[in-house]
Image (cartoon, rainbow, N blue to C red):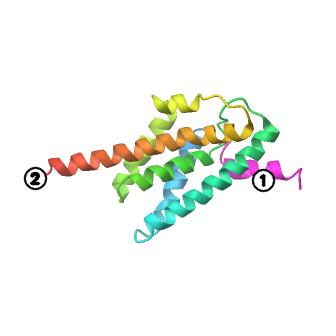
Amino acid sequence: MKKILPHLALAFISMGIGRLTPAPGTISSLLALCLAWCIPTTNFYIALPILLIGLTIISLIAINIHLTFANPTKDPGYIVIDECIGMWIALLISPLGLIWQSIAFVFFRVLDIKKPGIIGYVDGLSYKNTFQHSIIIIADDVVAGIIAGGLTTLIKIIYHYWQF
């Protein structure tokens, strides 16, 4: 079991698409968006947080297992489960609807790729062990998701305010 555990962890955190080129993070975020669209709107704000909490806990464990064996120095690009977490956070904050959630997707990808301000700061934090490293790998996407969702909501507010 010890020999297969790192491989299972890698398969989970890469979602089977982590080594695809180009843009595995964008593909992962798009997959997260499509999965969220499968949730009925009446249950969206109940089901998605439950899925998000579960995914985050399992991801932290799987990333920690992988880092124990692989020992990469930075946030490896093939770990894409964190993009799903960040995307789902953006969707929870942004308004419901295809247009608004698509805008949140674009904001999230731009913020996750460019890593401006606090997102870049969080991404560059130092760590002392694999668990801290696991948290940092996910944390920059959490911050990007919060900002993307907030920007999308702000745009909707401005859009509705200026309509007569």
Is 107 within the magenta? no
Secondary element type, mark 2: loop
Quadrant showing the N terminus: bottom right
User: For the view shown, which residue lies furthest in the front direction?
Assistant: 128
Where does the image place residue 49, in percent across and percent down from the top left?
51, 60
Q: Which residue is mark 2?
A: 164
Q: Could you tell me if residue 16 is visible in this image?
A: no
Label 1: how many residues lie within 10 Å, few (<14), some (14-19) or many (20+)?
some
Q: Residue at x 54, y 54 (%)?
A: 31
On screen, residue 33 versus residue 16, left or right, reads: left
Q: Earlier in the sequence, mark 1 or mark 2?
A: 1
Where does the image place residue 48, in percent across and percent down from the top left?
50, 62
Where does the image place residue 89, in percent across and percent down from the top left?
48, 51
Return the mark for residue 8: 1
Does 91 sit above or below residue 39? above
Does 124 sit above or below residue 161? above
